[in-house]
Amino acid sequence: MCPNELSLKLRVDILTPTFDEEAAVLGCYQAVREVFKTRPNFDYRHTFIDNASSDSTVDVIKQIITRDSKVRLIENAANVGAENSGYHGILQLDGELFSVVLCDLQTPIETLGQMLDMWDGSVDAILALKRMDGVKGIDAVRGAYYSMMEFVSDKVHLRGFLGFGLFGPRVLSLLKDNYESHPYFRGIVPNLPISYSTISYSQPARKLGKSHHTFKDLTDYFFLGLVVSSTRILKWSVIAGLLSGALSGTVALGYTLAKLIWWSAIPIGIAPLLIGTFFLGSLMLSLQGLLGLYVTRALEQSQKKPLVIEKERTNF
């Protein structure tokens, strides 16, 4: 192949986050390699970022590196959570395109191939949307989650977008320019000033290894999405507080007038107690939303902290 042909190749960075994936990591590497074997117009590099695995995942990756110079490894010094680890890995990439391929291949390798074939540079990203064609009960819960997020969110929340896609250089540049202390990747990308197209896929069952996501992890992720994506709830708290304050003030005024009109019928001490309770309650409800807005603003302006402390890099 001549130098001019080499220069026309687009370099694609594939990122695979791992945590105790010794049974699946080799299969993931081989699947990615096969995709690019049949697409000579792309060059690629496969980066694994390991989130302090306790099994032999790192050893398997290092064995692969000795045979294939296209593979690289970032080792985290400690488990910092899947979102922080994956997002940190993305920020270390420098290819012209990038994609995140999960080690269990529940981001289908066939869909990655389809996105590569679709890529013509006319958009900044191709977002892969998971179809709701799995277990009915689970899909119903997911549907309810998306409906709720659409209702409370100030931002775009794409149904079925879990972070899988093919992203161009503008996306990577914007991600690197905008610091996120709590990265919510599926919520960040659709709200960037970019153009994108979409493709649908069906999520296959995991064939090797096991999922390490616990109910606590899923709950934390739910609240992360809720807090990061919307300030409407805080604003609603202010409105609710003001309405409640107005109602409380009306009730307090009513009791005051009742006490003045039927002085002897209302025991001494009840009116001040009720008036004070309603007043303090309305004051607290009115201010808690404002306090939340101030706290949110302070957090956004807070000092940057590293997402990950790396232990070691291999083949960088």
Image (cartoon, grey):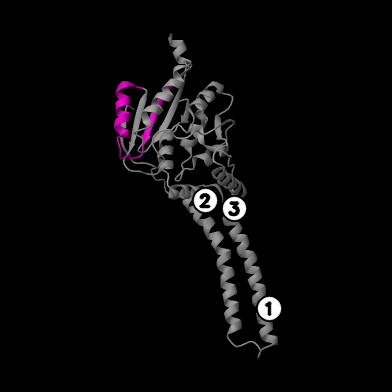
- Residue 11, above or below 182: above
Disc 1 marks a residue whose amino acid type is Gly
Q: Which residue is mark 1?
A: 254
Q: Earlier in the sequence, mark 2 or mark 1?
A: 2
Mark 2 and mark 1: Cα distance apart in space: 39 Å
Q: From the image, tell me which residue sits under label 2.
A: 227
The magenta segment is 44-69
Could you say which is closer to the camera, residue 129 or residue 293? 129
Badge 3 vs badge 1, beta-carbon distance below 8 Å: no
Look at the image and tell me in which quarter the C terminus lies.
top left
**Residue 232: mark in rendering:** 3
Q: Amino acid at mark 3?
A: Arg
Q: Is residue 121 left or right of residue 81?
A: right
Which of the image's four quarters has the N terminus? top left
Q: Can see residue 94?
A: no
Which x, y percent locates residue 73?
Answer: 34, 31
Q: Percent from the top left, x then y, of residue 26?
A: 36, 28
Magenta-drawn stretch contains 18: no
